Image (cartoon, helix red, strand yellow):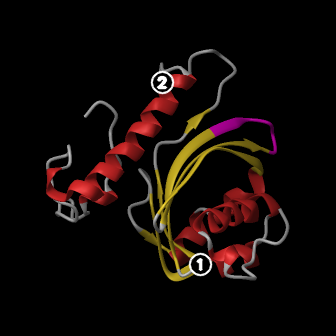
Amino acid sequence: MSSPTLNSAADADPITVAKKTYQAYVDKNRTAIEQLIVDDFHFISPLNNRIDRRTYFARCWPNSENIADFKFIHLVNEGDRVFVTYEGHSRGGKGFRNTEILTVRRGKLGRRKSYRAWRRTSRRRMRNGRSRTETTAVCAGWQRRERLRRVEGANWPGGKAAGARSQGGQTAEDQPSVPGQ
């Protein structure tokens, strides 16, 4: 992949934007990723509850120094969102795997929701006790749940209407799905 900056309307495609943000980490190109992220960007993860752009760059960007590459397992575009599961490798050779949902607005990354990360192991079973096939099925289940929630609104399996507030002040959409619930 060449430069992570956007040069045409085709570059504004959500999957293209997603790939370019990950490539900026591999290339250690902060200027490129700054051009790909909107000013009112928010990042959500189990460790970071809706942090803003400035905090994201302070906390997360330094990790780019350790990133060697990403291999995409799933890249699924649905409207303005991209469902991404990837395996990455650190410069030290350690593997890791993560699932994220990226929201793209006007050709730039507006929000990044990161779900539980886990280390990739060479063993048949992963550290969480699931096989790679089971883990892929869980990720596909998350995607189906998101699609069902959007299509059926208040009747989605979680029992809350889209946008309903939880006790923590987050929308139901902001809360990571828990397999088996």
Amino acid carrying label 2: it is Glu
Range of residues picked out in magenta: 91-96
> Please, which residue is most extreme toward the top here?
124
Query: Is 178 covered by the magenta stretch?
Result: no
Which label is found at residue 107? 1
Name the residue nearer the viewer: 104 or 150: 150
Left or right? Give the position of 25 relative to 47: right
Quadrant of the rendered image containing residue 108? bottom right
Kind of residue sitting beneath label 1 = Gly
Q: In this view, does 115 lie above or below 52?
A: above
Asked if residue 40 is positioned above or below residue 98 in the image, the reply reads below
Q: In this view, does 49 lie above or below 127?
A: below
**Quick check: can you spot residue 127?**
no
Residue 24 appears in which quarter of the rendering?
bottom right
Q: Where is residue 56 in the image (x, y as percent from the top left)?
A: 55, 69
The residue depicted at 52 percent of the width and 46 percent of the height is 99
Percent of width and height locating residue 165:
17, 63
SS class, disc 2: helix
Q: Position of residue 45 (x, y in %)?
A: 44, 55
- For the residue carrying disc 1, how many other residues have a C-alpha within 10 Å: few (<14), some (14-19), or many (20+)? many
Q: Is 161 displayed left or right of 3 in the figure?
A: left
The residue identified by callout 2 is 134
Mark 2 is surrounded, within 10 Å at the Cα level, by few (under 14), some (14 to 19) or many (20 or more) other residues, namely few
Q: Can residue 128 be seen in this view?
A: yes
Q: Which residue corresponds to the image point at 20% horizontal and 43% vertical from the top-left? A: 157
